[in-house]
Image (spheres, grey):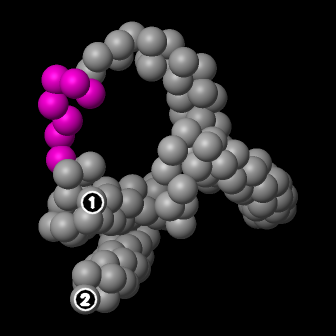
Amino acid sequence: MQKVKIQLMSKLTLVIGVGLTLLFCYKYEMKLGGLILALTIQEVITYLFLLIASCRMKDISEAVTFPGGEAFREWKAYIMVSLKTSLMFMSAAWSGQFAIIFASLLSPTQLAAMVAVREVERVVSNVGMAISSIGAAIIGALIGNPNVD
């Protein structure tokens, strides 16, 4: 039942995204800036829907709620380990967003070339993310949680 609700919410956010895109791009004539704004609002709404749905699921509600004091023990060590990786992921994500913004200044041929390069980059990066996820799942199973889905 809960999966059905999450699927309906994801479809609802797609409809909201299409509506916002039409509103910003055509009615307000914001062009690419309107598309970026619509997609950003859609992503925020999707995140909020998933957060609310996750908090209501019995299996994972404890993991989604705010952690207690024990979760912040040795926080500095975890931050130091994850800082470089976090910066790498953030720079990759934001560079792509800035490339899209600057692409609105290009001619149609240059814009098409940029889109092609971004799609190739997305496919290549997904391979790396999949390998990373598999590695994390194997390490998690070795540490002690064999229930990897």
Q: Which mark is residue 1?
A: 2
Would you say 52 lies left or right of 73 here? left
Would you say 110 lies left or right of 146 here? right
Residue type marked 1: Ile
Crowd rating for badge 2 (residues with CA inside 10 Å; few <14, some 14–19, many 20+): few
Residue 69 falls within the magenta-colored stretch:
yes
Q: How many numbered marks are there?
A: 2
x, y percent for residue 71: 26, 27
Name the residue at 18% across, 47% down. Answer: 65
Which region shows up in magenta? 65-71
Q: Which is more toward the observer, 141 or 55?
A: 141
The residue singled out by tag 1 in the image is 60
The answer to which image quadrant residue 11 occupies is bottom left
Identify the element where label 2 is drawn.
loop
Name the residue at 78% across, 60% down. Answer: 123
Residue 3 falls within the magenta-colored stretch:
no
Name the residue at 54% across, 56% down. Answer: 146
Above or below, comparing residue 101 to residue 92 in the picture = below
